DNA sequence: ATTGACCTTCACGCTGCGTCAAGGTGTAAA
DNA sequence: TTTACACCTTGACGCAGCGTGAAGGTCAAT
């Protein structure tokens, strides 16, 4: 398939000016030009543009992208793996930021009493990501790649070793406070909301990405699924529903 | 709490140059200057900077941010809701992009036979986000907001009414197949992997965004947490571990 | 042969800072 | 006290990555 400049632009979501600029700086040249000087792009250029956009998405400068793509040691398979990891990092940061907004909203609505200045900027800093970018040089990539994979795996390992005690403590605290909260009968009360908050913290140990929807979904699952329901309702019938309602309120999901 | 320019910069993860520039263009002025002309920032400025960074993160120009923040009709609560939605949109786009990388990797490894040119650029286009940005004008915000909130709420509602039966069916199927799989003793076997796959499908009803990490985390949770563990191990001891191992293999998380 | 949607090159302008330069300030140690 | 050193100031230049004309050629259909 061959593309004119505008068609390629539409396909990839970039402007024709951008494509001309990329030609100008030599990062993406058309496969040929028509008799009248029109730029014609082919299959290779489509794929190369995709790679360029992956790097651009990660904030790599066009100059560096050019160097990377034209390096003789460029390994597209490794690069893709690296992209994947970077994107996952980016999503984690986004999740932090979302949690930040949500906490700020909760603060404004009085559902949460305080927020440190530090917390207010959680998720904005991109230091770790930028450090990764600095390491985007082709040679270090392979080594660093394995390292981060290991780190990702370590997270679960360490968790079961180091933090296991804390998670268990949290879980039992949730259990205790939930029992108290149920007695009040008010899922919007402070005890119930504290339970929901603790539950969220607890989830933090298992989910690298928190979302209100997932939290609310889990809460609904507690009610729908017999095994969860029977666990929660063991001490006091209706506890699963109560917890769900509390979490729905906490996450802002009305029924 | 009062901050010097550098301290505020560190707190928020921006450079001192940036803060001076923000002063220069009048978007964020210090509350006062010390006797020797040093910029001193107070609590209000911290909060304002947070708001600025939220908008900046969404790609709004500083000029527009200035206009928005100084508009008499500016409603910070609504703005925060809007930020939240935009961030969720952004995450959806990121998920598309991640899916794109993963499919490209699969293509390279021959696990997938083809990928259209259109698919190659899935997740790059930010049209929807930009359109939202255009709507960042205060008046449309409220209306558009409620609509998407309603949609999000609908997801859970419909679920409990319509799909409840299917979810329950899935859950019991998982239970059955898992019991069979445990007998084989091989978490990498096809029965175990089918269980993991069903488990993933089942999760799909509760999580709007699936991630391998979260799935693996949940699996680990099944082992760490007594209530889950006792449920799974009821029929056959070691079932929780078995399921975790199967899911680890399924998601690619080695221990 | 005219219209309208394409394409070309050239060139200026903009945003959001990074990065010196040249100097003043605060304070703690020597 | 002075010396070091980390902090602060204003001013000015520079840069990436395009957006946005201008002035003109091309292509296909009507």
Image (tube, coloured by chain):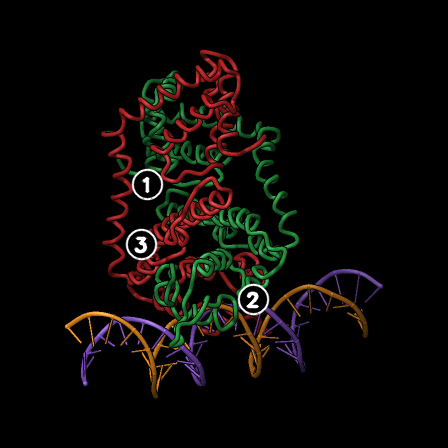
Chain colours: A green, B red, C purple, D orange
Residue at (55% x, 48% y) in the render:
A77
Quarter holding the N terminus of chain A is bottom left
Image quadrant for the C terminus of chain A? top left
Q: CA distance from mark 2 to mark 1?
A: 45 Å
In the image, which disc is placed on residue A252?
1
Q: Nearer the viewer, residue A136 or A41?
A: A41
Q: Residues within 10 Å of mark 1 (few under 14, many from 20)?
A: some
Q: Are marks 2 and 3 in contact (CB under 8 Å)?
A: no
Q: Which residue is mark 3?
A: B78
Residue A63, disc: 2
- Residue B54 in percent (x, y) is at 42, 57
Q: Label 1 to label 3, Cα distance in Å? A: 14 Å
Describe residue B203's horizontal placement relative to residue A129 as left or right. left
* Residue B55 place in picture, x, y as percent: 40, 60
Chain label for disc 3: B
Tell me, yes or no, whether the two marked residues, 2 and 1, touch with CB atoms within 8 Å: no
Subunit bearing disc 2: A
Dividing the picture into quadrants, the one containing residue A213 is: top left
Q: Is residue B3 left or right of residue B179?
A: right
Residue, far top: B235
- Where is residue A247? Give x, y as percent: 36, 34
């Amino acid at each position: 398939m061959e593309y004119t400049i505008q068609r390629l632009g539409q396909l990839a979501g970039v402007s024709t000016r951008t494509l001309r600029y990329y030609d100008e700086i030599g990062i993406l040249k058309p496969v040929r030009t028509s008799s009248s000087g029109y730029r014609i792009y082919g299959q290779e250029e489509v794929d190369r543009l995709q790679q360029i956009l992956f790097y651009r998405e990660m904030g790599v400068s066009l100059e560096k992208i050019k160097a990377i793509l034209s390096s003789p040691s460029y390994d597209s398979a490794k690069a893709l793996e690296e992209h994947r990891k970077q994107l996952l990092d980016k999503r984690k940061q986004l999740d932090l930021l979302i949690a930040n907004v949500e906490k700020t909203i909760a603060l404004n609505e009085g559902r949460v009493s305080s927020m440190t200045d530090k917390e207010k900027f959680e998720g904005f800093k991109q230091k770790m990501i930028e450090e990764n970018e600095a390491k985007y040089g082709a040679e270090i990539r392979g080594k660093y790649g394995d390292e981060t994979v290991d780190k990702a795996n370590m997270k679960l390992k360490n968790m079961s070793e180091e933090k296991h005690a804390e998670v268990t403590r949290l879980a039992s605290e949730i259990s205790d406070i939930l029992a108290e909260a149920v007695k009040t009968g008010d899922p919007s009360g402070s005890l119930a909301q504290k339970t929901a908050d603790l539950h969220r913290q607890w989830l933090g140990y298992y989910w690298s990405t928190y979302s209100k929807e997932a939290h609310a979904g889990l809460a609904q699952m507690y009610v729908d699924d017999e095994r969860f329901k029977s666990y929660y309702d063991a001490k006091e019938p209706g506890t699963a529903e109560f917890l769900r309602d509390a979490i729905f309120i906490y996450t802002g999901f009305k029924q």
